[in-house]
Amino acid sequence: MARLWLVRAGKNGERETAAISQSVLAPGFIEVADLTPAKDRDAVLVKITEALPSEGLNTRKNFAAQLNQFRNTIAIGDLVVMPRKLTPGVAIGRVTGPYAYSDDPALRHVRSIEWKRVDLPRTAIKQDLRFSLGAFMTICEISRNEALKRIQAVIETGKDPGPSLAIPKPSKPSPVATDEVEDAEDAPTDIEDLANQQLIALIKSEFAGHALAQLVGEILEADGYSVRVSPPGPDNSRDILAADGALGFGERRICVQVKSGDKPADNAVVLSLQGAMTNAKAATGLLVSLSGVTPPAQKILDDNFFTLRLWQMPDLLNALFRTYHRLPDETRARLPLKQIWIPVGRDEGGEA
């Protein structure tokens, strides 16, 4: 019987684009050597110890349990949910191949996957399963609350039907050692990710459409720029013009295009931003896209590194956190935040 797994693509989504474009799972742990000869958790632990000898024993055991799942437990045909960081959605796919060690040093440990959904809004999944997606683990199983059946329904219909009212039958022990199978329900919760997802939902609700351009403009003002935000309506691909210096007559001139929709910005959006930069005599362009960009659009951005930048959701959040205390009172009232500090131990399940 198929199983359902959570596999992340980097704490900050650094392997997310490659995972989707190359149809692979890429959980990281890139310091660890090829696991092809490692047939069980003890063999994986040896590889972990060789790569990370200074880590504590509990941390190494934790990493070994996760990588053993990836190497030896996840089966072809299993479903996988990959919570996305660069956009507020999730990707869901079916595993199509065995473990492999990639030549790409940024990926290394991979499994091939057929993605069924790559930009599913998290709101399509009901709260109990969304909570499981916040497990503080890079790789773990999601088994409770009929998760597999419900995610299969999400693939087919785009909606989570929720748990049935029938009393669930006791599950049989897994054929693999039970102490090495970590379930999302048993793992600590990633408090930071959970808080960020709540904040993302609040931003999308309070600053939909043109209001997001206003928020970005206020962030740039808090960073010391003189800003002009275009009024609602046609904007000729420039929602914001910003520049430094007195009255905005400085040399650092930025043309900003803001996209708040649920679809990735395509190459036409980037090309139109370049045209707007020329018309406005701006030296640089900033694309703010809450749903990321398509691969062709990313290619243009990469080829124009010295003149174009992209803000996806993590970048917007970082800018918001950096400038929050300098934003207008009205904006802070719409986005009420409180900073707290908590101790974090690596033994809780993050990647190497």
Image (cartoon, rainbow, N blue to C red):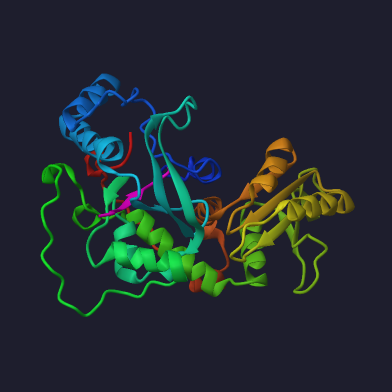
Vertically, is 324 above or below 75? Answer: below
Residue at horizontal 58 percent and vertical 59 percent from the top: 290
Residue 161 in percent (x, y) is at 35, 75
In which quadrant will I find the C terminus? top left
> Can you name the residue that lies furthest to the right here?
279
Left or right position of 188 against 34: left
Q: Which is more toward the observer, 93 or 9?
A: 93
Residue 124, x across and y down, in percent: 43, 70
Residue 6 covered by magenta stretch = yes
**279 within the magenta span:** no
Percent position (x, y) of residue 87?
Answer: 52, 56
Q: Which residues are magenta?
A: 1-9
Name the residue rendered at 23%, 67% in the picture: 145
Query: Which residue: 33% across, 70% down?
Result: 127
Asked where in the image residue 186 lies, by quadrant, the reply is bottom left
For the N terminus, the quadrant is bottom left
Work out which residue is located at the far bottom of the displayed protein and give it.
Answer: 165
Q: Position of residue 41 (x, y in %)?
A: 19, 32
Residue 18 seen in the current view: yes
Q: Nearer the viewer, residue 328 or 294?
A: 294
- Taking the image as drawn, is residue 336 in sight? no
Query: Which residue is at a point 55% across and 70% down the rendered structure image?
Result: 331
- Nearer to me, 286 or 188: 188
Residue 283, image quadrant: top right
